[in-house]
Amino acid sequence: MNEKPEKIVRSETEWRTLLTQEQYQVLREKGTERPFTGALTQNHETGNYHCAGCGALLFMSGAKFDSGCGWPSFMLPADSKAVEEHEDKTFGMRRVEVTCARCGGHLGHVFPDGPQPTGLRYCINSASLTFTRKKP
Ligand code: FE
């Protein structure tokens, strides 16, 4: 991917129709699933993680690691242009929000406490992802 993905814009009504309630709360309302409850937190299979909102490839299993934080954690995105980062000062914290570059859906946050070589931890809600297992 050499250029930024084309944006997908949908109305709130369309998103409500397309997404489950949990996906809607996370992706469109910037919710956070409770830790250790997401379906993909403990997923160790080889494959790709796509945006649950628009299908864009966001993360790959090779970058996933066990952070112990309770959410799927990745050292880096599948492509630097697949996600966007935004300063987030809600809840009295300074965090960096991560969104899908294509549909704007909220994914989670990125923290500077990940393993080398990136030193980053993309802490991503399971509800904002769909997993596609790599065919053997
Ligand atoms: Fe998306």
Image (cartoon, rainbow, N blue to C red):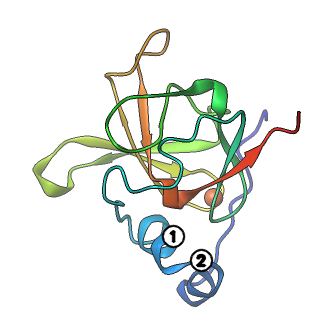
For this rendering, which residue is in front, 2 or 105? Answer: 105
Whole-percent x, y for residue 3 in the image: 76, 39
Kindly indicate whether the residue at mark 2 contacts the one at mark 1 (C-beta within 8 angstroms). yes
Residue at 57% over, 90% down: 13
Would you say the beta carbon of the disc 1 residue lies within 8 angstroms of ligand 1?
A: no
Whole-percent x, y for residue 85 in the image: 45, 42
- Residue 102 has which mark? none
Query: What amino acid is found at the position of numbered circle 1 in the picture?
Result: Gln
* Residue position marked by numbered label 1 in the rendering: 23
Query: What amino acid is found at the position of numbered circle 2 in the picture?
Result: Leu
* Residue position marked by numbered label 2 in the rendering: 19
Q: Is residue 29 above or below residue 54?
A: below
Residue 83, picture quadrant: top right
Whole-percent x, y for residue 45 in the image: 67, 36
Question: Could you tell whether 103 is left or right of 24 in the image?
Answer: right
Residue furthest left as drawn: 92
